[in-house]
Amino acid sequence: MNKVFIYIIISLITIQLSQAQDSPQIKSSIDQNEIKIGEAIQYTMEVEVDSTAMVIFPEGKTFNPLEVIESLKTDSTYNERKLKLIKKYALTQFDSGQYKIPRQKIVINEKAFYTDSISVTVRDVVVDTTKQKMYAIKPMVEVDAPLSTGWINWVIALIILGLVGAAGWYFFKKKKEKEIKEEELPPYERAMLTLKKVDESNLLEEDSYKEYYSQVTDAARKYLNEEVYDHAMESTTEELIAILNEQKKSGDLSLEKHTIDELKRVLETADLAKFAKTKTDVGTAKADRNSIEEIINQTKEAIPEPTEEELLEDETYQEEVAIKKRNKKFLYGGIGLVATVILILGVWSVVKGVDIVKDTLLGHPTKTLAEKEWITSAYGIPAVTIYTPEVLIRNNYQTTEEQKEILKGNETFVYGSFFKSLFVQITTQQGNPQQQEPIDLSKTVEAVVGQFEQMGAKNITVKDEEYQTLAGAKGIKIYGTFEVENKTTQETLKKEYVMLNFAEAKGFQQIIVVNDVEDRYAGDVVNRIVNSVELKNVK
């Protein structure tokens, strides 16, 4: 009993050892635990597996919070039955601090194995200001916007689409023209052309007897329909043969009896092929085709010559047909043109948006201003330089008694109207020589509500913050919204405004920009105007 127990224990230990030897060996390491911001860490995974094992290394954002700069190719070495795989990654981080590279999952033969997590320290880059000279931040410089190339792809796509559409239209037009020319042929020539097309087809080789006989007999029926009996197409074989026999007896058609009998035989053969799905041999089918051609020729000779009245009636009819066909051509052309325009507008609307397309085609005042060439000008004393779509016009501005005590003279320049989509106003006033202290700009915040109320504004919101131009002129920026009623249309307009106030050279400079809240183009226009404001001779 003890021997059996010992044997079982030894067997279990042997199995576990063999499994341990066959289990994958996984190691992970980094070349350094401490780096500077932006410096690279080399992260290495080593996997030792059986040579037949399938190994999948991690890819993607599994190393967060560290970023993968590069995932290098996997190296491999063989040692007897073992395969050693080495996978390396270049990692980095652009913020200082303590980080931990998370456990990484390696899939071996569809089973997941995990590496250990590793800590990494990222240090700031220390700058010695005694050796490295520091420079002030350079002011923003206005440059022309780079020419976007994205639209070129859409233009190319539209051109290709247009070419494909034009090619399709051309082939469709050619096909229609060919069909129209065939329809304009006299009945006899059209019947011969149909038989010629049957000869050029491979219907008999393809064992399509039903289609073959349909086309052959239709050539005869269409000819008879136009020249002998105008219901030949929808008549049964018996009805058509009965009509031909009646016309022969009445003398309207001098057709031999054996010709009518031959036509009856071919039509009955065709009926069997079409409805009973019977088949004849190729030689008989070709002989029936030749019989139809002979029947058409004999019928043509048997038809009496038309009278002069009939010829006149036929000429009038042909003219009417030609007019209808010409009108149909114009209709198809118009439909094609409209469809092309709709297609182009549809693609354009998907790419740019319906509102942008509508404003481009119908025009939008603010969009027009944004896209035109702008002007940089200086206004008033002390001069205010500003970038606007139009030159501002000099206007009178009424100063209060309190302002007259500390200011002298005033110059006001405006563009647009308080009730239009865009309004710009610049006011400059020189300081009074007796005034020793500069103007207190904080009082302008209190005066905004009263100033706008004089213009008819209601529900005014006011926010303010300190403001500084790129050249260093300091002032106060006041902004918010209000409502104003258009006296002409009785419509309430929702507006937003930006007001810049400066007190340079002991004077007063004020820039006001007002726009419609719902104007989708106004934001860019207002930002361009406000960001361009500068005061001359500011030190």
Image (cartoon, rainbow, N blue to C red):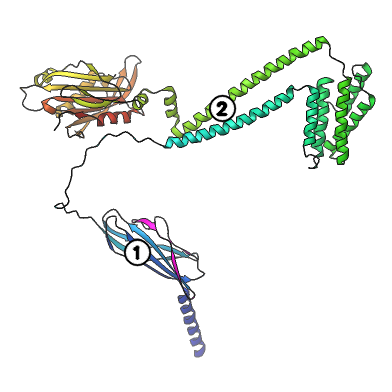
Residues at marks 1 and 2 touching, judged by CB atoms closer than 8 Å: no
Give the amino acid type for the residue marked by disc 2 in the picture.
Answer: Ala
Q: Quick one: 291 or 321, which is closer to the camera?
A: 291
Q: Quadrant of residue 195?
A: top right
264 relative to 208, above or below: above
Residue 115 spot, x, y in % from top left = 39, 66
Give the amino acid type for the residue marked by disc 1 in the picture.
Answer: Ser
- Asked whether residue 239 is in view, the answer is no
Q: Which class describes the residues within 10 Å of circle 1: few (<14), some (14-19), or many (20+)?
A: few
* Residue 466 sits inside the magenta stretch: no
Q: Quadrant of residue 125?
A: bottom left
Q: Quick one: 537 or 402, which is closer to the camera?
A: 537
- Which residue occupies 89% across, 22% down? 243
Distance between the alpha carbons at the discs numbered 1 and 2: 63 Å
- Which residue occupies 48% across, 84% down? 10
- Which residue occupies 18% across, 45% down? 135
Question: Does dot 1 land on a helix, a strand or a loop?
Answer: loop
Question: Does dot 2 land on a helix, a strand or a loop?
Answer: helix
Disc 1: which residue: 117
452 relative to 47, above or below: above
Q: Which residues are magenta?
A: 53-81
Residue 118 spot, x, y in % from top left = 33, 64
Left or right relative to 344: residue 292:
right
Disc 2: which residue: 339
